């Protein structure tokens, strides 16, 4: 795998302000959707991002792409901090990073033909016109496994899997270096999911694209990812290679998530233990002090409720934010 860094995120936060009062001018609180996240993503690499619904995964992906503007922190594309750019200054960079959305039904304009949907990025960036444009659309349809004669069909004339292929073709139009895949298979039938995952694998191998793959399905993430980040209440709990994380998870939250993944062996499944977490996920408006996971953690001790752990390398580029491991290593 190439080692060139495509995207580097440094201490990124995204707070959504809440206002009250008759004209809603008094700032009363913040929803801390992303709270101090850092990572790098390399060429041809897939970083899987997992966690419960509402933990900030999709918000993080949108902040990296500048669809949401970060509250603080940096998003470095090469030597350029994208968070400092806006408008016309940001536009030239947008062709280098794209997004595949979760719902192929809502993410495509029903009034556009397949050709118009796929070609929209080409038109916006004035990339090509005429025959060159039509040839590129046909090439993209072929690349994602659709026939060129489908170019004049509308989204309602495609199946769910075919619509997601259209979304992938649109994302590929400008030959991006980085794509955020925001739960790209969760709205599809199980029989179609494997086809889309295999397509993404093939495209990555062919074009060297880096993926941030957001999902709540740990089985899918295990298949497609090189590294995996586990997110809880806006923070990274653990970050490591896929092999290390699934073989020896260190954070109690990661251990609980993996214990709930079904095992396709009835005998093993019948005898394994599942870690059941107590309570509910705290509100991101008022996260608990110390480690945000401490109210639900079966291994929490006094330090956990007073001091927030730092994401620390415990060896082999395996990072964990847990006082159990910072105590052992430091």
Image (cartoon, rainbow, N blue to C red):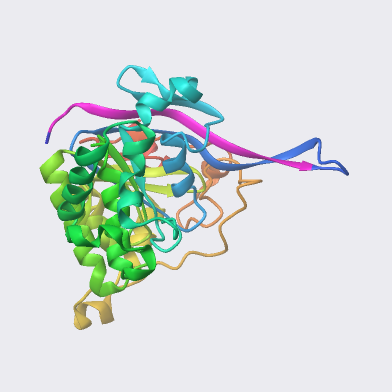
The residue located at (21%, 66%) in the rendering is: 194
Q: Is residue 147 on the magenta stretch?
A: no
Asked if residue 221 shows in the view, the reply is yes
In the foreground, 49 or 113: 113
Query: Residue 137, position in %: x, y?
Result: 23, 47
Note whether 112 is above or below 84 in the view shown: below
The residue located at (33%, 65%) in the rendering is: 259
Query: Residue 198, position in %: x, y?
Result: 17, 59
In the foreground, 330 or 275: 275
Query: Residue 139, position in %: x, y?
Result: 16, 48
Query: Residue 154, position in %: x, y?
Result: 36, 63
Left or right: 108, with 292 as reference point: left
Left or right: 245, with 29 as reference point: left
**Residue segment shown in magenta:** 2-19
In the foreground, 119 or 253: 119
**Prevailing secondary structure of the magenta residues:** strand
């Amino acid at each position: 795998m190439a080692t060139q860094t495509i995207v580097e995120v440094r201490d990124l936060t995204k707070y959504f302000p809440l206002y009250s009062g008759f004209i809603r001018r008094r700032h009363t609180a913040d929803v801390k959707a992303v709270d101090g996240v850092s990572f790098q993503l390399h060429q041809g690499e897939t970083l899987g991002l997992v966690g419960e619904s509402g933990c900030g995964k999709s918000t993080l992906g949108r902040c990296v792409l500048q669809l949401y503007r970060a509250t603080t922190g940096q998003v470095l594309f090469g030597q350029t901090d994208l968070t400092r750019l806006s408008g016309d200054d940001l536009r030239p960079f947008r062709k280098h990073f794209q997004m595949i959305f979760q719902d192929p039904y809502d993410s495509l304009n029903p009034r556009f033909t397949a050709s118009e949907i796929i070609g929209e990025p080409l038109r916006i960036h004035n990339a090509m016109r005429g025959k060159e444009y039509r040839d590129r659309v046909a090439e993209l349809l072929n690349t994602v496994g659709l026939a060129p004669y489908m170019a004049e069909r509308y989204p309602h004339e495609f199946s769910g899997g075919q619509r997601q292929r259209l979304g992938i073709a649109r994302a590929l139009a400008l030959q991006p270096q980085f794509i955020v895949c925001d739960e790209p298979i969760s709205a599809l039938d199980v029989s179609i999911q494997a086809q889309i995952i295999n397509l993404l694998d093939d495209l990555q191998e062919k074009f060297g694209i880096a993926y941030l793959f957001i999902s709540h399905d740990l089985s899918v993430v295990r298949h497609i990812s090189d590294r995996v980040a586990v997110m809880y209440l806006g923070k990274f709990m653990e970050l490591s290679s896929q092999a290390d994380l699934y073989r020896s998870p260190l954070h109690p939250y990661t251990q609980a998530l993996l214990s709930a993944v079904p095992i396709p062996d009835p005998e093993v499944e019948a005898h394994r233990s599942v870690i059941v977490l107590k309570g509910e996920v705290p509100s991101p408006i008022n996260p608990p002090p110390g480690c945000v996971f401490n109210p639900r953690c079966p291994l929490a001790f006094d330090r956990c409720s007073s001091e927030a752990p730092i994401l620390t390398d415990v060896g082999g580029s395996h990072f964990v934010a847990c006082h159990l491991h910072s105590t052992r290593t430091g």
